[in-house]
Amino acid sequence: MPKSKFELITPCDILITHGPAYGFVDTVENKRETHLGCELLTERIEEIKPKIHVCGHIHSGHGYAFNGHTHFFNASV
């Protein structure tokens, strides 16, 4: 059985993806309770614990979050 795309993400210090992880810098403007990030990416980040995760895609989610081990940056403008 082939590995999922998320299993191909190997341990690293800095992870850069197009979209955000679910629950981190992934909300829609005026709907802060609505998360649009990827749940599978969040699971993988919890497993490999990179120091930094940089993403974009959800423009209104721009900003910073920290979960105790990973700094999340949504660098979209």
Image (cartoon, rainbow, N blue to C red):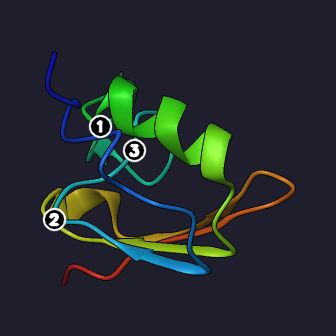
Q: On the image, numbered disc 3 is attached to which residue?
A: 21
Labelled pair 1, 2 in contact (Cβ < 8 Å): no
Coordinates of residue 20 in the picture (x, y in percent): 32, 52
Q: Give the residue drawn at x 21%, y 79%.
A: 76
For marks 1 and 3 on the same chain, the one whose residue lies earlier in the sequence: 3
Which residue is nearer to you in this view: 51 or 76? 51
Residue 66 placement: quadrant: bottom right
**Which quadrant, please, contains the C terminus?**
bottom left
**Which quadrant, please, contains the N terminus?**
top left
Which residue is nearer to you in this view: 18 or 27? 18
Labelled pair 3, 2 in contact (Cβ < 8 Å): no
Q: On the image, numbered disc 1 is attached to which residue?
A: 37
| Other-residue count near label 2 (Cα within 10 Å), few / some / many at <14 / 14–19 / ≥20 | few
Which residue is nearer to you in this view: 43 or 31? 43
Residue 15 placement: quadrant: bottom left
Q: Amino acid at mark 1?
A: Gly
Q: On the image, numbered disc 2 is attached to which residue?
A: 18
Secondary structure beneath dot 1 equals: loop
Secondary structure beneath dot 3 equals: loop
Coordinates of residue 10 in the picture (x, y in percent): 46, 60
Q: Give the residue drawn at x 15%, y 65%.
A: 18
Q: CA distance from mark 1 to mark 3?
A: 5 Å
Q: Give the residue drawn at x 50%, y 47%.
A: 24
Labelled pair 1, 3 in contact (Cβ < 8 Å): yes
For marks 1 and 2 on the same chain, the one whose residue lies earlier in the sequence: 2
For residue 66, side relative to residue 33 (left or right): right
